[in-house]
Image (cartoon, rainbow, N blue to C red):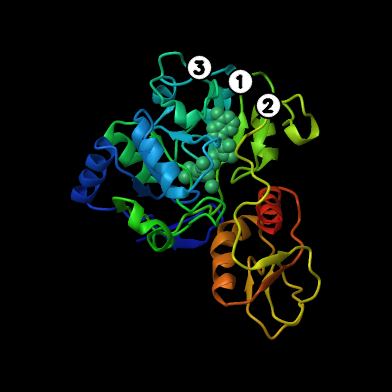
Amino acid sequence: MQHFTDKGKMVDAPRQPDAATMAEAAALIAAGQLVAMPTETVYGLAADATNARAVAAIYAAKGRPSFNPLIVHVSDIAMAERYVAPTALARRLASTFWPGPLTLVLPKRSASGIAELVTAGLETVAVRVPAHPVALELIRTSGRPLAAPSANPSGRLSPTRAADVAAELGDKVGLVLDGGPARHGLESTVVEASGEQPVLLRPGAIAAEDIAAVAGRPVLRPEADPSLPSSPGQLASHYAPRAALRLDASDVRTGEALLAFGRDVPATTGPVVNLSPAGDLVEAAANLFAALRTLDASGASAIAVMPIPGHGLGEAIGDRLRRAAAPRG
Ligand code: TXA
Ligand code: MG
């Protein structure tokens, strides 16, 4: 089956596992096991957010530093309200962008039942309603709020296909649900919405400009104002392929692969992936992680990355590329 995206492009419709597979996945969640699930952003490594042992297994499987809190996935606003206290700003953003790639950080309710490990001891919880039908069905069938980081080993590229998860974490999860390639290919936008002004904790699949338009307020950025809340999970080195990255490249050096964007591509005899020959930032975001994996697999020791505009989704693309290029710890 195929459907049309808002860009008018034909893509495969999200795949839907059969009822028996979904029942098995829900049973694994109830038993405190891990299930890899598709979302519209990237694949997630899901566990019952109220089960501390299950959440600990997520951190262990990813090799993730335990100070990095996780997003809780819920089926709708009403379910979110069991765990967090929404603000007027949060309601406004949620009613426009949910289900979808927006994560809201809000004050935790005192009897939320969310495991401490999910929030890494913070008094806030990050919640989102995913748009992918398989993720929504897993939440509904299991009846549990699902803590789910991207389903990759900590610091590595986020997975946009079930095969990526199976290759890297397959031995650590009970089941990988295949929902087809992730539509956005880039994680959700994380917004702290406890006050009146939205604070952008992580640029993502919804552009900051669109958040500001719906909020009716400019989006604040913690890096511009140290007094604002910030996100503990924003590691300098992240999303890293094996190859080194050279950003804003206008040429390709010997031995380098090329991550291209737009029409005017420098000449090279090495491997090339163009994120969007037409220069479309939405298409480029959707292709980003898969393109980096492809170039990594080519065996090149370095990847030259052409300049990418910083507006719209270009902000999130630039954020991921800078982290991928950062010195590794
Ligand atoms: O698209 C996505 O968001 C994907 C899919 C699977 O939903 N998930 C994802 O999760 O990217 P993860 O764990 O890789 O990133 C969660 C981000 C981190 O930057 C983390 O620091 C931030 O959300 N975060 C989570 N809880 C927070 C909190 N209470 N306060 C501030 N930041 C929080
Ligand atoms: Mg991640």
Residue flagged by tag 1: what amino acid is it?
A: Ser
Residue flagged by tag 2: what amino acid is it?
A: Pro
Q: What element carries label 3?
A: loop
Query: How far apart are labels 3 and 2 at the CA level?
Result: 17 Å
Q: Residue at x 32, y 53 (%)?
A: 177
Q: What element carries label 1?
A: loop
Query: How far apart are labels 2 and 1 at the CA level?
Result: 10 Å
Q: Is residue 44 above or below residue 254?
A: above
Give the x, y percent position of residue 242.
Answer: 59, 66
> Dots 3 and 1: beta carbons under 8 Å?
no
Q: Is residue 135 above or below residue 254?
A: above
> Dots 3 and 2: beta carbons under 8 Å?
no
Residue wearing tag 2: 229
Q: In this view, does 33 lie to the left or right of 324?
A: left
What is the number of the mark on residue 164?
none
Q: Nearer the viewer, mark 3 or mark 2?
A: 2
Q: Does the rendering let one see residue 308?
A: yes
Residue flagged by tag 3: what amino acid is it?
A: Ala
Residue wearing tag 3: 85
Cβ of mark 3 under 8 Å from ligand 1: the answer is: no
Cβ of mark 2 under 8 Å from ligand 1: the answer is: yes
Residue wearing tag 1: 194
Q: Looking at the image, in which quadrant does ligand 1 appear?
A: top right
Give the x, y percent position of residue 221.
Answer: 74, 33
Q: Residue at x 33, y 51 (%)?
A: 173
- The residue carrying pointer 1 sits among few (fewer than 14), some (14 to 19) or many (20 or more) residues within 10 Å by Cα, namely many
Q: Which residue is drawn at 35% across and 34% down?
A: 53
> Dots 2 and 1: beta carbons under 8 Å?
yes
In the picture, the quarter occupied by the N terminus is bottom left
